[in-house]
Amino acid sequence: MSSTIIKMGKRAFKYDKILTRKFGKRVALLRKNADFTQDELAFKANISSSYLSAIERGMTDTTISTAKRLSKALNINLSELFTFE
């Protein structure tokens, strides 16, 4: 039974990594479409440039409040950050 839990946990972790990468690519695309540098968007969203870089590279998960700040800085609806192609 415990191996099932471990396998389920690994699957969830793998999905989280895929979602994190997709989210990061989406943020990078929207940033470039808005013609912002990473430094400019980070400043507008009140986060560090290194944190934004990690988000865009899919290296870190983010919070809902950070996603909200990013959407406001990009002048888009929050839901647009989660529209993956």
Image (cartoon, rainbow, N blue to C red):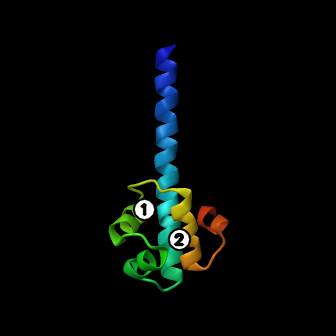
The nearer-to-camera label among 1 and 2 is 2
Three-letter amino acid code at disc 2?
Answer: Leu
Q: Is residue 3 visible?
A: yes
Q: Residue at x 42, y 75 (%)?
A: 42
Three-letter amino acid code at disc 1?
Answer: Ile
Q: Residue at x 66, y 71 (%)?
A: 77
Q: Residue at x 51, y 22 (%)?
A: 5
* Residue 57 or residue 60, whichever sits in front: 60
Real-space Cα distance between discs 1 and 2? Answer: 11 Å
Q: Position of residue 24 (x, y in %)?
A: 47, 63
Q: Which residue is mark 1?
A: 55
Q: Quadrant of residue 75?
A: bottom right
Q: Position of residue 21 (x, y in %)?
A: 46, 56
Under circle 2, the secondary element is: helix
Q: Position of residue 47 (x, y in %)?
A: 41, 69
Q: Is residue 60 left or right of residue 5?
A: left
* Residue 66 or residue 20, whichever sits in front: 66
Mark closer to the chain start, 1 or 2: 1
Q: Position of residue 69 (x, y in %)?
A: 54, 70
Name above or below for residue 45 compared with residue 8.
below
Q: Pointer 1 and pointer 2: residues touching (CB < 8 Å)?
A: no
Q: Residue at x 52, y 28 (%)?
A: 8
Q: Quadrant of residue 64?
A: bottom right
Q: Which residue is mark 2?
A: 70
For disc 1, the neighbor class at 10 Å (few under 14, some 14 to 19, many from 20) is many
Name above or below for residue 11 compared with residue 68.
above
Q: How many marks do you count on the picture?
A: 2
Q: Is residue 51 left or right of residue 76?
A: left
Under circle 1, the secondary element is: helix
- Which residue is at the far bottom? 35
- Which residue is at the far top? 1
Q: Is residue 84 visible?
A: no
